[in-house]
Every structure is written in C-alpha cells, then in structure tokens.
Amino acid sequence: MSRSPKYVAAAIKVAAFAAVLAPTALYALTPDLSPEQKGRPRAEKVPEAIAAIAKDFKFANDGALTVATTPFELPLDAYATDTKTAIGNEPDIAQLIADSLGLKLELVPVAWPDWPLGLASGKFDAVISNVTVTEARKEKFDFSTYRHDVLGFYVKADNKTIEAISEPKDVAGLKVIVSSGTNQEQILLNWAKKNKEAGLQPTEIQYYDDSAVRHLAIESGRADADLEPNATEAFYAVQNGKTRLVGVVSGGWPLTAEIAVATKKGSGLADAITLALNAQIKNGNYAKVLERWGLTAEHIDQSRTNPPGLPKS
C-alpha cells in the first residue's frame, strides 16, 4: 500500500529528529536547579506584540501574565531546589513572552487534568505545559506554537534484544509503558490494534502514575519499553545512565505535531503571544532557551496561531 504525501513528509521529519536526538548530544550540560535562575534569558518589550493584545482583554492579575504550568520533569518543568519554584524550558518560554508583553510573570502550578477548566474560567491567562495542538482542543482554545512534539521509546540501557522501535510491528509481543490520557497512548493503542489485525503478538500496555515507578519498571525488567515525551526521557537517560533511546516518533504519528501556548478561545491574546514568540525566535533568545535545556533539536522556525492540529479520533 502506498503512503500518503503527509505520511511520507512526517516520516522524513521524524528521521531527521532521530539523527540528532541522541541523549548525549542533547544533554551534555549541567542544569541550573536553583530557584534564582540567574542564567534565564530575558527579553525587551515587543511593541507590536503589546499592540496586538485585544483592548477588552482582562488579565487574571493586573500587570502580570499569569501562566499555568505542570511541574513534573526536567527539562520541561519541575521544581527547583527550594521545592516551590517552577524551572525548566516551559517557565523560560513563559518569561520571554511576559517580558515581550511588558508584564511581570506569575507562574501557577496546576495538575495536568485541571488546566482546561482553569483556562476557560479565567483563572490564568495562558497554559505552557507541553500542550499539543489538536482540532478538538482548538474548539475551546487558541494556540501559539513554540516547539515540535517528539516522542521517544526508551529501554533498559543494557537491553540486548531491542535495538530499534519505529513502526507498529516493533512493539508486537512487548510490554510497553505509556501515560494515560496522552497522545502517545493513542499512538500505542493504534499500533497494538494494527498488530492484532495483522495477526502479530499482542502488546501489553502498562500504566503508572509516577515517573519513578515507570523507570523502575523498565530497569527491573517488568516492562520492555516506555513511550513518553522524548525531552524528559532523554534528560533522565543522561542523568542516570539506566535507560537508552531506541526510536522516536512524531507526537501526531503518522502526522507531525507541534507544542503550543494555549489561551482561551477568542480572548484576543493568542496573536500577541505569537508575535512575541516570533520576535524572540528572530533575536535569538528562543534559541538560547532551548539550548539551555537541551531542546535545540525540537525548535521551530516560526510560531503560528492556530495551525492545523491533530485530527479528532
């Protein structure tokens, strides 16, 4: 069966990611875990972005951009050594946007399932928490893209039987961990279904709420592989040396997908954020943030407001 141009394009992009996503290349750095974050890139005001804010937009807190984020794992978002200050790529991106809009940054830690209601109710102005653009989400929220969505398959570092995972048949007969309610879960379920239809061995899908338990399951042999956002797993692999990358797929497999800042639908803030991001891409601050957290390979060349998202299932 021939593959569609979109599928082929996605495969080419993912292959390009795979060539540069080796953990040792991404995370040859010592992250700053301090609450002060003195090395965090800062930005000047961007007049055109400020002018693009809707005149009737009401910020959650006067003089501030209030951003919800979900501290869970570096390099995306976690707590500093004081156990209360959010640090990582997502807070750094939030800081660049707040600076661009001439506002103070207020970060609000929330549980992942709670951000849609909080954003819709006006509890915060934006969400920056590794949110993928989907057509279903676009019905309720606006988006400003800032990173490619890349997922990684990881196995125990000394696993001698699994060399590569890149397509459905590669997970046949394996025990694979995935996080519930995520895009990667949908991909894995889709792959397992395709294998069943092809008469291949079933995939045992495992779920764990805690990342430490996930890693222990891989390291102890209770599971064969783990499919998660590549950024967090690559970081863990280098910090601990107990797991290794065996394959990457786009977060929208078989299509490509992008991570974006989410704002309330029609609130009048998305275009301003997109302009702010593009200004920071142009002046190099965006590249500094990604380099700071080892995410250069997931960069985008231009932020877009409400691009095509992953289709409804």
Image (cartoon, rainbow, N blue to C red):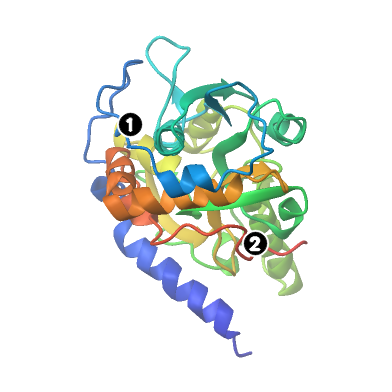
Q: Where is residue 47? Give x, y as percent.
A: 42, 44
Q: Residue furthest top?
A: 82
Q: Earlier in the sequence, mark 2 or mark 1?
A: 1
**What element does badge 1 sit on?**
helix
Left or right? Give the position of 249 relative to 244. right
Q: Residues within 10 Å of mark 1 (few under 14, many from 20)?
A: few
Q: Which mark is residue 309?
A: 2
Q: Nearer the viewer, residue 162 or 168?
A: 168
**What element does badge 2 sit on?**
loop
Left or right? Give the position of 288 relative to 153. left
Q: Where is residue 191? Give x, y as percent.
A: 66, 63
Question: Which image quarter: residue 247?
Answer: bottom left
Q: Where is residue 132? Give x, y as percent.
A: 60, 51
Question: Which image quarter: residue 117?
Answer: top right
Q: Is residue 160 visible in this depiction of the protein?
A: no
Q: Residue furthest bottom?
A: 2
Left or right? Give the position of 131 relative to 202. left
Residue at the disc numbered 1: 240
Q: Is residue 61 above or below residue 204?
A: above
Q: Residues within 10 Å of mark 2 (few under 14, many from 20)?
A: many
